[in-house]
Amino acid sequence: MPDRSILAPGATIGILGGGQLGRMMALAAAELGMRSHVFCPDADGPALDVAADRTIAPYEDGAALDRFAGQIDCATIEFENLPLEALDRVSRHVPMRPGSASLRITQDRLAERRFVEQLGVAVASHIAVERAEDLEAWDFPAGRAVLKTRRFGYDGKGQAVVANVDEAAAAFARFGARPAILERFIPFRCEASAIVARNASGAMAAFEPAENEHRNHVLTTSRVPARLAPATLERAIETARSIATALDHVGVLAVEYFVTGTGPDETLLVNEIAPRVHNSGHWTQDGANVSQFTQHIRAVAGWPLVTPRRLAATRMVNLIGDEAENWLRHAAEPGARLHLYGKSEARPGRKMGHVNHVAEGGGEGGAG
């Protein structure tokens, strides 16, 4: 394989996945003079509108993956629930960034938590659930718990808060008796996320952590600066750095945290790792000197990373379902930067776009 560690302008980056994250990565690649080739099974994926080339095929289609790999110089991902075999197949032809090692851990909640614990990082106490009888080992009188499927859960899918064994068993059955974890319900004060980028040489750059709010398990708002102690923000970044290094991850990676306590008792618990660009990093498109998407493309292309710097207090608001119908109002609002994904159908819970509210003059106002 020829040395493709650094891609020159004019190179083609393959993107596995055709959603809005792929769309924004393709736009970032174009700004750096690179082309994108999107591989996805859906002919109406939002990324296809802005990609230079496309391959519409299942991720299990080996012949299509080989043809795809023959037309690109490097490959990346836009979501983590991809067949590992697809990544390994593409990596036989071109650099795959990140590779299957990152996804092998982050696709499985139990493997992810054990990996994080081995790094000496705190997570919620939990047990593995392979069968309904395993639920009886949990001490429910001590408080509520959350049952989560080990795989294919996002935006609250495959999760249920339970108060006793019977509720847990019913949720386990509702989830098809698939392998799961049962973990302590965390009465967190708020949620936060740290986003870092790492290139193949191991160089890293971190964005300022964001404070996040969810509604019905879907992210609704991210804001910077986060209302957290400086020491807590630094711990969030250092933890994300250590995770990216241990995974030998190339590209952007996000770590989501539960925040408990206040002041000197403020504590972080890792909730999830996303081995990709992340919804809570959308604020960087307008509120920072470099977006997470541009940083990701730079990382996978082997370019130097930009040292991120927040330009102003920024609040990102997701437009979910029919909220996107108010696009004209958002477009007219001072300080509001509207980003729509080009999806044809608005469904409840579906992310249709987002708005970044950037404080005028770089101050702190307008981001609350």
Image: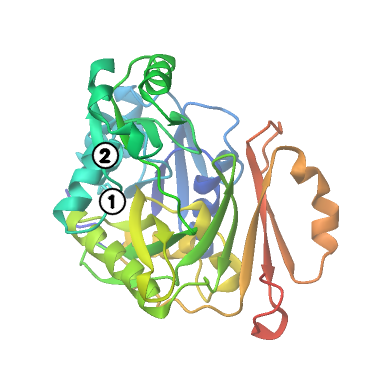
Residue 2 visible? The answer is no
Q: Is mark 1 on a helix, strand or loop?
A: loop
Is 108 located above or below residue 254 in the figure?
above
Task: Give x and y (percent) for residue 103.
Answer: 28, 41
Q: Residue under label 2, please give it.
A: 126
Q: What element carries label 2?
A: strand
The answer to the question of whether label 2 and label 1 lie on touching residues, with beta carbons closer than 8 A, is yes
Q: Residue 123 carries which label?
A: 1
Horizontally, is 109 left or right of 291 in the view?
left
Badge 2 local density, few (<14 within 10 Å), some, or many (20+)?
A: some
Towards the viewer: 10 or 222:
222
Q: Position of residue 60 (x, y in %)?
A: 33, 22
Q: Where is residue 70 in the image (x, y as percent from the top left)?
A: 31, 38
Q: Nearer the viewer, residue 243 or 46?
A: 243
Expressed as whole percent of the image width and height from the top left, the position of residue 347 reads 68, 31
Which picture quadrant has residue 352? top right
Disc 1 marks a residue whose amino acid type is Val
Viewer-proximal residue among 251 and 216: 216
